Amino acid sequence: MNGVTLVLRALHHGEKHLAKELTAVAERHRTEHEVHHVATDLARWSHTHVQRLADTGRDHGVHLGDPSGDDSAGVLSTLREKTAEAVVHRPEPGLLLLRDLRKLHLDAAGNSLYWEMLAQAAQATRDTGLLALASECHPETLRQMRWTNTMIKNLSPQVLTSL
Amino acid sequence: MVAPVDRIALPWGSRTPYGRHESWPERQDTCLREGVDPDTVQRWVQAASILHSDGDAMDIAVVDGRMAGVRGRTQDRVNRGRLGPKDLFGWQANASPDRLTRPLVRRDGQLVECDWATAMDRIVTRSRELLRERGPGSIGFYTSGQLFLEEYYTLAVLARAGIGTNHLDGNTRLCTSTAAEALKESFGCDGQPGTYDDIDHADVIALFGHNLAETQPVQWMRLLDRLEGGDPPRLLCVDPRPTRPARRATVHLAPRLGTNVALFNALLHEIIRTDRVDHDYVAAHTVGFEELASRVKDCTPRWAADICDVPAARIGEAAELLGAADRLLSTVLQGVYQSHQATAAAVQINNLHLIRGMLGRPGAGVLQMNGQPTAQNTRECGANGDLPGFRNWQNDDHVADLARVWNVDPETIPHYAPPTHAMQMFRYAEQGSIRMLWISGTNPAVSLPELSRIRSVLAQDRLFVVAQDLFLTETAQLADVVLPAATWGEKTGTFTNADRTVHLSDKAVDPPGEARPDLDIFLDYAARMDFRDKDGGPLISWHDPESAFEAWKRCSAGRPCDYTGLSHGKLRGGSGIQWPCNERAPEGTDRLYTDGIGWAHPDVCETYGKDLVTGAADDVVEYRSLNPDGKAMLKAAAYLPPHETPHEEYPFQLTTGRTLYHFHTRTKTGRAPQLNEAAPDVWVEASPSDASALGLDEGDLVEVATPRGALRGRLRVTDIRPGLLFVPFHYGYWDTGGGHAPDGGTPGRAANETTVTDWDPASKQPLYKTAAAALRRVERGDGRPAPAPTTTASAPSRAGTVPDTVGGPSALVTESVGAPPDRRKEQPE
């Protein structure tokens, strides 16, 4: 197993995890409408990254597992949405939201650094396919990070001063 | 030539054709109360329309201290004397017997009359309590698109520097925030690039989600006059409904809802593929062309055809029309702004003009429109989720400059985050962190999405709601304090239309009872709260409309919306004037960006931009590296599927919108008999194929349901896009047994019972044109037609199957063409 394979595996895992987390956060904060909708859209980016990493892995002789694996079981996601609706008039979920956004940001930052490594390795090995993958996907990871950062910046003054 | 015309039956009146590059002839429309003729009018008082954003200049006729009618002002650049149906008949609502005449406060659950001191004292007491116990973030202000400039500015100062809250927005969030955001994204700063005069010169006019005939009927008259004159323009119309412009268009595209970005990317793809690009303009005035070209490289018409459900050949024809234009004018409205990916789509229209170099010349312009008469002023004055004068909240120099104007410390003005948008304010109120919401001149209990949720927010005991309005609206019925306000014709002030034309509107008559101008109410509150500047002087030192205007001029000085060359005196008597108006442009400015891009430099821009998909904010470092020289920015956006798509249970797409005869929630137009009778109740539009598949006929009572709620209305079968339903958003509950909400005896009637809470991440504009819905029959119509007009986009699919909409003798309006305008007795009270 060479270094590129290691990073591909780690990134595949990281993007799959982020897609799952974005979906879970979207459900948990069903009543924070912007978070709900944008997180759902951004999960789609990570899903696409997972798919493309799996395809690239195959070209490199690495099997990265079933990319469509969807962990958000129907019952669990319904439960999360119902919980959100039950506390719609409470301020405390605001704190939970900030915590979740922070976690999403750190997960995305972890992925971003793997994309950086992958791009560097691709340049060193002159692997144009791998470089193209990294340069197309990495900007979306950075946009996921900017989004979580913006939401934290915009929401925390109100959430943290109103408890 | 003088002829009476039924202006309900013929809303756009008679034609005065003119040729390309000629000036639009005058036509004076006059509507006077029965028994009054021009010779018996005692005074004509200058005003402009506040029932849409066109800015039609008019005079109010006064007889014995009462309004007796209106006439258009022929000397005005906007309308040259013409008036639309709402202008002609809407004034009657001022004299409605159910106007609020005294303040109301809630006692033991009931709203009871009281005096002003009692009502204001209750507001001041609550404000002070909240400031002491919970801080300024617990107080929010939600204003309108129909107050005057002087009022918005005063409200912005008292909220941002007096209370020190970040929570001030207008209902303009629902109508104009995408226009503003799209301009900021492309040009670095808000400001309408084009002018209505471009209609006189364009050879191709493209209307993107803009039903001009019903939203700005007077500019549609202008377009109709050009269509009947020499060298008429060709039209492109993108609209899923069979609007009047669609019926006159050379190419009409009726895309699936929520697919604008795919369609516009395909149009850009074709423009670039056929090399209709003005490479010199692109090189001199833009950044980002390579990125845009690569992002639309695969967006072929064939690709978009499947997404948009529009034939690829039609998309090609549309691109050909745009690409071959000599002078292209584009206009954009709610079909883009209230749809999925709103800002991303609106920005692509700016891109179209930038890559074609169609900007800043007669006939070559873009009009990012708005719906409300004074929406521009909320944007300028900082009452619409921006800082006043298009200042950049992320730029400390801009904040310091504003603090200098207000003589406060910069820290007084919240700028740690963007000003809070309306949808977020309602979320904070729902969550309990906003405890006081002061609502002026708007009716969120009918106009915001997902009404059951909005009612539950407003009805909370812990939320102190102030409603300032003309009538006991659905919202006012849920308030804790209701303040009776004076309106248009009863107070003096200025406002600015969609092409930056500033008009003066003078007081013609006294308001009813104890109703007071909104400005007086805000000034009274500021005085009672004793807001001070940093030297201990009064924060707000002005006392009437004219002194407020002078204060605003100081705030606007040197900004893009520079008003320093204007005054109430200068605006009185002549035509409206387009800002910027200052020493360099003493008669105003017809077009922006005639000589390059003026307000995009990193040091002067209003925003550093946002991610069009996520809404994430860029910072100054990114902006400076992308756009160091302050050029226009070509921003690409990828298509994303809509968030709610039809499926088995909800098989239709649902869109909402306005009709020609009504404004907003009908608080005024529902009280003007001719307008009310033209469209007296809600209806539902569906296509012939969908109606016949469900066995439905014209006039059947149907129910439209979504996961949020349902409404009932009678069916009108039109040539709307198959698979799509349309419901007008004007109808609420004030004129039903329900009062403010549906109840046992009153089924859902408001379109917003069904709409989804979702907004564009960049502009934060709610998406009213994006729901999935079910349709079923409740009872047969048995020949009774739907209460929908036949004169508009709601015309029946088969002509002659329902009676024509007419107004009769009470709707007769005099149209004078070629007569010398009567300028006698033109004076304020």
Image (cartoon, rainbow, N blue to C red):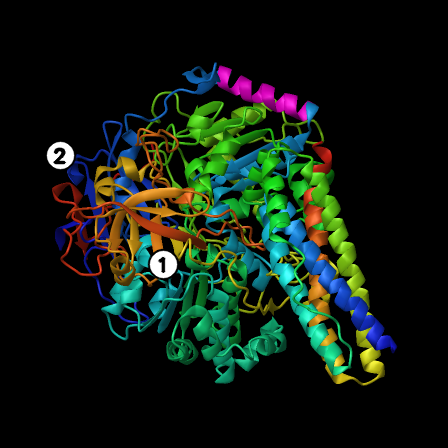
Question: Looking at the figure, which quarter contains the N terminus of chain A?
Answer: bottom right
**Quadrant of residue A137 within the rendered picture:** bottom right
Which sits in the foreground, B697 or B8?
B697
| Mark number displayed over residue B547 | none
Q: Say if the magenta span includes residue B124.
A: yes
Which sits in the foreground, B17 or A105?
A105
Name the amino acid, label 2: Gly
Q: Give the residue number, with chain letter if any, for mark 1.
A: B724
Q: Which residues are magenta?
A: B118-132
- Report the side of B216 relative to A146 (left or right): left
Q: Confirm whether residue B814 shows in the render.
A: yes
Residue drawn 20% across the image and 43% down it: B31
Q: Give the residue number, with chain letter if any, for mark 2.
A: B35
The tag earlier along the polypeptide, 1 or 2, is 2
Mark 1 lies on a secondary structure that is strand
Q: Confirm whether residue B79 shows in the render.
A: no
